[in-house]
Image: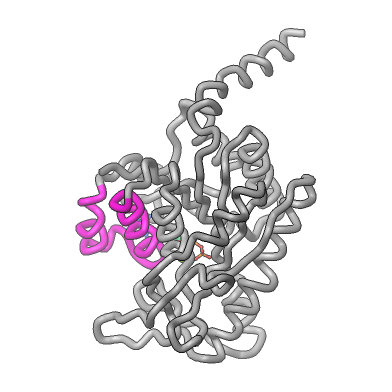
């Protein structure tokens, strides 16, 4: 009996959070190894399903860098990165779209639907949700990498209003109708800002932002957004963490109330963050 009373207490503890966030939009950027390990994948999906069932409005924006690299290597193409962004020629853009919009997106949709909820997979191309222009980086041409100019939220809002969970692949088009690969962190942040989301959560394959990437005990729990450029300049934040940290800062600047980087490898990290007092990962402050 005691065991059941303890379980009931856990549910009651979540009540204030359920009340606070009911009806609110939470954008989850799902990427890294949290998307590769099947057990972890199942736990992330369970968290999202539970969120939806208790009245929150989750929106998923996914990455798929590892899957794109794996597919490119199958066709004998090397993956190159500049400042954490994939150098994307026409062939790479086509492979990225196939992997993201085709495989990764529909896998996530199906995993959600296995729980009897309805998810709809779209890419930023659908209903011109993500309008982009070519990303300019000093001294480099990274090819078909898009900078988001505008998020047209109509389709996402229609899906949310009809109780679907939107699952969005980070692919967009420019004014000429060319296809661009978008770093999913930018897509998530732009979408969260445009939807005036309550929370923006980046699930990745590290504990959060670490002072020393090799030392998981060096987690920085709170970062004021004005410190981000300095941490990048000092090379504390590097590689794939550069766009993510920039997007966290950008999320806060766009008015998203709470922005977090969480360890997607930790089982139920989303539930821990949203429905308990436990502070995990890195939280960004204005
Ligand atoms: N200071 C830092 N703290 C933590 N991780 C860091 C830091 N600097 C660089 N990194 C790297 O950033 C990586 C996370 O970014 P990455 O782009 O690889 O994953 P993701 O964005 O979650 O997935 P995807 O790109 O597929 O969407 C970590 O695995 C780590 O190697
Ligand atoms: Mg990344």
Visible in this render: residue 87? no
Residue at x-position 32% and y-position 56%: 250
Q: Is residue 117 magenta?
A: no
Visible in this render: residue 90? yes
Residue at x-position 54% and y-position 86%: 92
Can you say whether 227 is above or below 269 in the image? below
Q: Which residues are magenta?
A: 225-254
Choose between 261 and 154: the one closer to the eye: 154
Q: Quadrant of the C terminus?
A: top left
Choose between 177 and 53: the one closer to the eye: 177
Q: Main secondary structure of the magenta part?
A: helix
Q: Is residue 93 left or right of residue 54?
A: left
Quarter of image, ligand 1: bottom left
Q: Quadrant of the N terminus?
A: top right
In the image, residue 90 lies at what x, y percent? 52, 91
In the image, residue 13 lies at what x, y percent? 56, 19
Dividing the picture into quadrants, the one containing residue 268 is top right
Tally the numbered discs: 0
Can you say whether 113 is above or below 8 in the image? below
In the image, residue 165 lies at what x, y percent? 64, 51
In the image, residue 147 lies at what x, y percent? 38, 74
Residue at x-position 22% and y-position 59%: 229
Residue at x-position 61% and y-position 59%: 167
Q: Is residue 281 left or right of residue 43?
A: left
Can you say whether 19 is above or below 181 in the image? above
Q: Is residue 226 magenta?
A: yes
């Amino acid at each position: 009996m005691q065991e059941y009373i303890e379980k009931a207490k856990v549910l009651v503890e979540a009540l204030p959070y359920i009340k606070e966030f009911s009806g609110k939009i939470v954008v989850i950027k799902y990427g890294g190894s949290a998307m590769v390990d099947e057990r972890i994948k199942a736990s992330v999906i369970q968290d999202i399903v539970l969120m939806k069932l208790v009245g929150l409005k989750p929106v998923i924006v996914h990455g798929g860098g590892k899957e794109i690299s794996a597919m490119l290597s199958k066709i004998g193409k090397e993956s190159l990165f500049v400042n954490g962004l994939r150098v994307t020629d026409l062939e790479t853009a086509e492979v990225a779209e196939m992997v993201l919009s085709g495989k990764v997106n529909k896998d996530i949709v199906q995993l959600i639907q296995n729980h009897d909820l309805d998810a709809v997979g779209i890419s930023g191309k659908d209903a011109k949700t993500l309008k982009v222009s070519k990303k300019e980086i000093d001294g480099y041409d990274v090819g078909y990498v898009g900078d988001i100019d505008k998020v047209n939220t109509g389709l996402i809002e229609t899906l949310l209003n009809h109780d679907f969970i939107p699952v969005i692949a980070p692919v967009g088009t420019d004014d000429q109708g060319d296809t661009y690969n978008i770093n999913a962190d930018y897509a998530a942040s732009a979408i969260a800002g445009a939807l005036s989301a309550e929370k923006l959560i980046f699930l990745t394959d590290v504990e959060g932002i670490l002072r020393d990437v090799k030392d998981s005990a060096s987690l920085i729990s709170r970062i004021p957004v004005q410190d981000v450029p300095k941490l990048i300049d000092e090379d504390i934040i590097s590689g794939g963490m550069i766009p993510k940290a920039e997007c966290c800062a950008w999320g806060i600047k766009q008015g998203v109330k709470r922005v977090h980087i969480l360890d997607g490898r930790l089982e139920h990290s989303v539930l821990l963050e949203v429905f308990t007092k436990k502070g995990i990962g890195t939280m960004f402050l204005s």
